Amino acid sequence: MFAALAGLAAAGLGLGVAEAVAGILPGATSLVDAVGQVVIDLQPPGAKDFVVELFGTNDKLALEIVVTLVALVLGALFGTLAARRFVAGAAGFGVFGALGFVAGIGQTQAMPAMVAIQAAIAAGVAIQTLSWLLGWLGIAGAPATASIPDPARRSFLLRTTAVGIGALAAGVFGRSAIESGRSSPTPSTPLPAPAETVPPLSADADLASNVRGLTPIVVPNDVFYRIDTALLVPSLDTATWRLRIHGLVERETTLDWDQLISMPQFEQYVTIACVSNEVGGRLVGNAKWTGVPLRDVLEIAGPTSAATQLVGRSVDGWTAGMPMAWVMDPAREPMIAVKMNDVPLPRSHGYPARLIVPGLFGYVSATKWLSELELTTWEAYDAYWVPLGWSKTGPILTQSRIDTPHGSAAVGRVPIAGIAWAPDRGIGKVEVGIDGTWSEARLSTPISDATWVQWLVEWDATPGQHTISVRATDGTGMLQEEIPSRPAPDGARGWHTISVNVS
């Protein structure tokens, strides 16, 4: 047990030091996140749906915790091996450091030399700590039956506690430094004012100020949902950022940041949603986006008539594929967004540039940290999520959600309220069913067909248990599907239903 505890403490300190080095050494990277990224890249079909269902937007934190726990368990194993033969335990830490190096150099902005130094320091610290702790016990290489004097045990426990505190301090420092580097920097060239702006929202466009618990019509950046495959959020500089447009084009083109933002920009409100969103889920949001019309950028390169698919590629290699017919349809305005709710894109939402394509789920359109636009045929390429079992086409379904009440309510007038969305068809009406009796809800004034609306019903609640459901009809007259289905492969279906106890 003592040897395993020594190995666990040594592994913890090694991990903490690795995080601290990542926070202060340019070109190094979080080895925990790097290993987690490998896990994401090797995920089997169905894993995304399962993990998001369990953890929602905390999926990345959950993976980081799992990677850390596995590392600590392996450290305990190496400590046990070292108690019998120290070289074996030390070799285990060496192999673990080598695996961290291999995972680290696969990250987008990692420098192999810096990652090598980082992995070597982390492994060296772990091995030295293990040797130091086992030396105080006097059991390194000793038989498993060797006895340990009480003074040595007490000294060992004190030193192990000190190592644990040091590991935690180093880890917290490193993680804080890494996270501080993930805030969006200031663009090298200030963003010009958009040529086309949206008018201020009318008072009846947002009902949230009068209904407690109702989602605001525009979701603030800091609470906007985030679902992507990047544990290590790319840190890009607009001074060196480039966008390559290639494939089935007449002129392969590369734009720098100044060239992109010198093009006329416009604003629009667009609701985007994750295909993993469960019925009644929170993986959907509405924001004001500012950017350059995507079609204007593509026109610079001159798409050929053979191009039937547009593939957006992130700087980390992630891809999303969408039909060219959808992108080129004048009924909608896909864009390369550079602002979110009037500020430069937050780094976690794609700084400095990302795709926003009204009406399509994010997994087939919303490329963050945009680096390439490739024009190809529909048959020639399957983007990231398609081989993992998700549909190649991803139009956002007509969906609705109850935000309030939650579980219980008092007798009397009770607001039943929520949101409904069908970008880019718009919402025609929302109906609320209370114990099987349906009535039409009041809607907020729609901003556009590309955004959600809020809805509200004033209910005279009576004592007892009540069942409340919601269903939406989109702007084409199509009613939201009732039969429940899971998110895979093309989005969840079903009417959101809750039970409310009135007393």
Image (tube, rainbow, N blue to C red):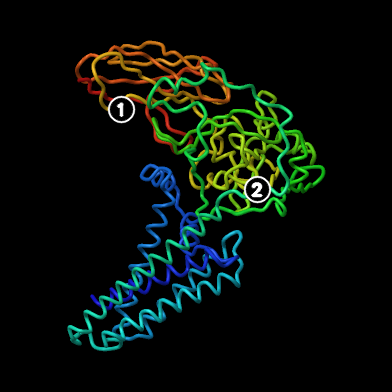
Q: Residue at x 40, y 81 (%)?
A: 128
Q: Position of residue 240 (x, y in %)?
A: 72, 54
The amino acid type found where label 1 is placed reads His
Q: Select label 1 or label 2 by which is in front.
A: 2
Element at label 1: loop
Q: Residue at x 61, y 39 (%)?
A: 343
Q: Position of residue 168 (x, y in %)?
A: 38, 65
Residue 14, image quadrant: bottom left
Q: Which residue is mark 1?
A: 406
Q: Which residue is mark 2?
A: 186
Please give left or right for residue 482 compared with residue 177 in the image. left
> Dot 2, how many residues are within 10 Å of its Cα: few (below 14), some (14-19), or many (20+)?
few
Q: Residue at x 42, y 29 (%)?
A: 493
146 or 261, nearer to the observer = 261
> Dot 1, how many residues are within 10 Å of its Cα: few (below 14), some (14-19), or many (20+)?
few
Above or below, 36 against 484 in this view is below
Above or below, 469 against 278 in this view is above
